């Protein structure tokens, strides 16, 4: 009987054709010690790709939520005055959170 993990391992081993530029880049990374071997480089590349896709999914989810909020009429128009008002509100809130140090100590 064939163990399913053996079948998965078989399919995870593959050959990849790199462009000459990619091959030079990989060779340089190994020679300079940036990565131990090509497999580590591929693992790092996949990790970065997975992180990028996770962030993309989060962004799309937040975009969907924002669009739904606008569809429900919960948005506010953005004007020069509304942005000035928002900036004043933020500065006022931060003034209480981060009090200015006393000038007497100088």
Image (cartoon, rainbow, N blue to C red):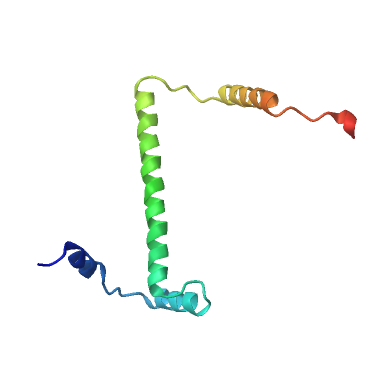
Image-based side of 17 in relation to 48, left or right: left
Compared to 47, does 96 lie above or below? above
The answer to whether 9 is drawn above or below residue 84 in the figure is below
The single residue placed furthest to the front in the displayed view is 1
The residue shown at (34%, 74%) is 18
Name the residue rendered at 38%, 25% in the picture.
69
Q: Residue at x 51, y 72 (%)?
A: 34
Q: Is residue 90 left or right of residue 4?
A: right
Q: Residue furthest left?
A: 1
Q: Is residue 91 above or below residue 16?
A: above
Q: Identify the image quadrant of the C terminus.
A: top right
The image shows residue 5 at horizontal and vertical percentages of 21, 63
Q: Position of residue 74 (x, y in %)?
A: 41, 20
* Residue 43 occupies quadrant: bottom left
Residue at 26% over, 72% down = 14
Q: Is residue 28 left or right of residue 52?
A: right
Question: Residue 12 location in percent, x, y?
Answer: 25, 67
Q: Nearer the viewer, residue 40 or 70?
A: 40
Indicate the quadrant where residue 61 lies. top left
Residue 50: give x, y in percent of width and height. Answer: 37, 54
- Depth check: give the residue in front, 100 or 20: 100
């Amino acid at each position: 009987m064939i163990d399913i993990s053996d079948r998965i391992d078989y399919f995870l081993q593959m050959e990849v054709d790199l462009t000459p530029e990619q091959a030079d880049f990989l060779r340089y990374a190994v020679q300079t010690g940036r990565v131990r071997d090509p497999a580590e480089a591929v693992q790092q590349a996949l990790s970065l790709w997975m992180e990028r896709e996770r962030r993309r999914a989060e962004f799309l989810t937040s975009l969907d939520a924002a669009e739904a909020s606008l569809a429900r009429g919960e948005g506010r128009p953005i004007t020069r005055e509304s942005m000035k008002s928002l900036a004043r509100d933020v500065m006022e809130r931060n003034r209480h959170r981060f009090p200015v140090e006393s000038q007497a100590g100088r």
